[in-house]
Image: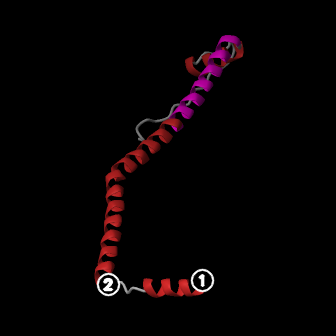
């Protein structure tokens, strides 16, 4: 037999119309697959939400760490200035303690705490 005849014969034998049960079976299989995917999504949704919360918390903590590191660096610079610079000590004594050199006049401005009464 010729090869084309064999292919044609096979096509004629395989030309079977799907019945309603074949279609129903496919729909059921597709439905089961969709249900399984939906089930996995619902199962892992709380885990996904918790992961998002934890990432946000980690970002917030990183921002707080950066803020505290800047504050610590400023404090370190202030401490070094107080320990090594006499002009810094003099400025702090004048500002915070109200000290003045002999012969200087000290003027203080007070703000009203009552809101303008």
Provide the secondary structure element on which disc 1 rests. Answer: helix
Q: Position of residue 63 (x, y in %)?
A: 53, 38
Instruction: Please tell me which residue is depicted at 38% across the width and 46% down the height of the picture.
Output: 50
- Cα gap from disc 2 to disc 1, whole angstroms: 31 Å
Local packing at callout 1 (Cα closer than 10 Å; few below 14, some 14-19, many 20+) is few
- Circle 1 is placed at which residue position? 3
Q: Secondary structure at mark 2?
A: loop
Question: Looking at the image, is 12 positioned above or below residue 93?
Answer: below
The residue closer to the viewer here, 63 or 24, is: 24
Queried whether the magenta region covers residue 80, the answer comes back as yes
Check disc 2 and report the residue beneath it: 19
Q: Work out which quarter of the rendered image holds the C terminus and state it.
A: top left
What main secondary structure does the magenta stretch of the protein show?
helix
Q: Earlier in the sequence, mark 2 or mark 1?
A: 1
Q: Nearer the viewer, residue 100 or 54?
A: 54
- Where 27 sits versus 12, above or below? above
| Left or right of residue 5, residue 77 in this image | right
- The answer, for residue 80, to whether it is visible in the render is yes
Decide whether residue 116 is among the magenta residues: no
Residue at x 53%, y 32% (from the top left corner): 65
Q: How many marks?
A: 2
Quadrant placement of the N terminus: bottom right
Q: Residue at x 36, y 47 (%)?
A: 47
Q: Which residues are magenta?
A: 63-84
Residue drawn at 56 percent across, 17 percent down: 97
Toward the front, the furthest residue is 1
Q: Quadrant of residue 18 in the image?
A: bottom left
């Amino acid at each position: 037999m010729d090869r084309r005849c064999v292919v044609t014969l096979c096509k004629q034998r395989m030309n079977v119309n799907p019945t309603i049960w074949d279609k129903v079976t496919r729909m059921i299989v597709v439905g089961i697959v969709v249900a399984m995917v939906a089930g996995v999504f619902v199962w892992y949704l709380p885990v996904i939400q918790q992961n998002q919360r934890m990432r946000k918390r980690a970002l917030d903590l990183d921002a707080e760490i950066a803020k505290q590191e800047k504050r610590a660096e400023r404090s370190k610079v202030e401490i070094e200035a107080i320990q090594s610079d006499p002009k810094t000590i003099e400025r702090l004594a004048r500002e915070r303690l109200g000290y003045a050199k002999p012969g200087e006049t000290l003027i203080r401005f007070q703000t009203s705490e009552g809101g303008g009464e």
